[in-house]
Amino acid sequence: MPELPEVETVMRGLAEVLDGRRIVAAAITRPDLRWPFPPNLAARLTGTRVLGFRRRGKYMLMRLEGGDSVLIHLGMSGRMVARRVGEPPVPRLGPQGAASDARGHNGPPEAHEHMVIETEEGWRIGFVDPRRFGSVDLVPTEREEEHRSLAGMGPEPLGPEFTDTVLSAALTGRFTPIKAALLDQKVVAGLGNIYVCDALWRAGISPRRLAASVAGTRAARLVPEIKAVLEESIAAGGSSLRDYVRADGEVGFFQERFDVYDREGERCARCPGPPACKGVARIVQSGRSTFYCPKTQR
DNA sequence: CTCGACTCCTGCTGGC
DNA sequence: TGCCAGCAGGAGTCGA
């Protein structure tokens, strides 16, 4: 479930391997993910130098020599894997932590590896996405913000432009739960189910509260908590190539422990926990799980 | 305009 | 122990 912090660390990992490097080979192995791949994508990538990366919400933009940018969304299950050209994929760890495949042979490409690029230096980067909710598109670098996926997107939560005034304005008049409003990428860019739950817990705001009633003093409490939870998660991703491209080839860092997300019935850090307190509650809002502490979130 | 329901997809979990 | 239904969710579409 890559959200802003995961996308940021994946992008930094890709930059470590691709920034300033020339792509010598590219292959697309199926016609589409969520959307069709641009028909000329492989041709456009091959022989081209990568000039740099930036992130917008949950999207990564890889700027290419020649004026185009590759717009990448990891969707639900997308990940980037890096290995040396000619080396087999490292088997994924099974449920018991044991390798689920034999290693050390030249096996087939990793399952669900839909796009592959190779650099002059011998790195082979694969975009793996079993559920195919991800997307890849080409957009002129000068017109990145006009792409239909980016146009109308809300402020970057880690930028100075994301203030309590701005958030209040976006929430005013909205009669939907704050949980749903924060998932709306037009309100703020890059939050998903996990960090919305944790940010609301940190701010002591109930996910069921109407968005309009968060405008004002509660927004002033929420904005710094959104920034903090995202910054802390990015910082946990580390700062060296070793951190970004792991031994198993996974690019980026994926946090697995949260304050309330996926912790139904467990003690939250502000409460005594069961039996004195029922612990973290799970409810369903617009079809998705919300985790929160009914005692401390109002 | 605003909001919620539905949709896409496959891997994992849990209940029998 | 094995099977399989159901759940997971980002974001676009559609209808109320």
Image (cartoon, coloured by chain):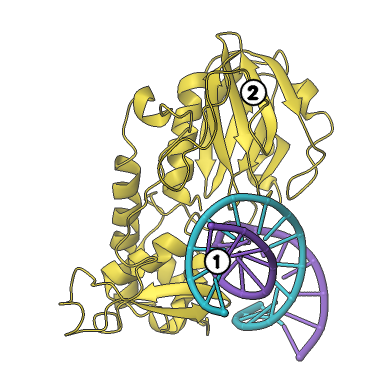
Chain colours: A yellow, B cyan, C purple
List x then y, in percent, for residue A38: 80, 36
In which image quadrant can residue A45 be found?
top right
Q: Is residue A169 left or right of residue A114?
A: left
Whether A117 is drawn above or below A37: the answer is above
Q: Residue at x 34, y 65 (%)?
A: A199
Q: Chain letter of disc 2?
A: A
Any part of residue A45 in sight = no
List x then y, in percent, for residue A249: 48, 28
Labels 2 and 1 touching (C-beta < 8 A): no
Disc 1 marks which amino acid? Asp
The crowding category of the residue bearing disc 2, from other C-alpha atoms within 10 Å (few below 14, some 14 to 19, many at least 20), is few
In which image quadrant can residue A288 be found?
bottom right
Residue A211: numbered disc: none
Give SS at disc 2.
Answer: loop
Give SS at disc 1.
Answer: loop
Q: Chain letter of disc 1?
A: A
Say which residue label 2 marks: A107
- The residue lying toward the viewer, choosing from A275 and A144, is A275
Q: Residue at x 64, y 23 (%)?
A: A107
The crowding category of the residue bearing disc 1, from other C-alpha atoms within 10 Å (few below 14, some 14 to 19, many at least 20), is some
Q: Earlier in the sequence, mark 2 or mark 1?
A: 2
Q: Residue at x 51, y 40 (%)?
A: A55
Q: Is residue A253 left or right of residue A176?
A: left
Total residue callouts: 2
In which image quadrant can residue A26 be found?
top right
List x then y, in percent, for residue A130: 65, 46
Residue A184: numbered disc: 1
Judge if badges 2 and 1 mark residues of a common chain: yes
Any part of residue A16 in sight = yes
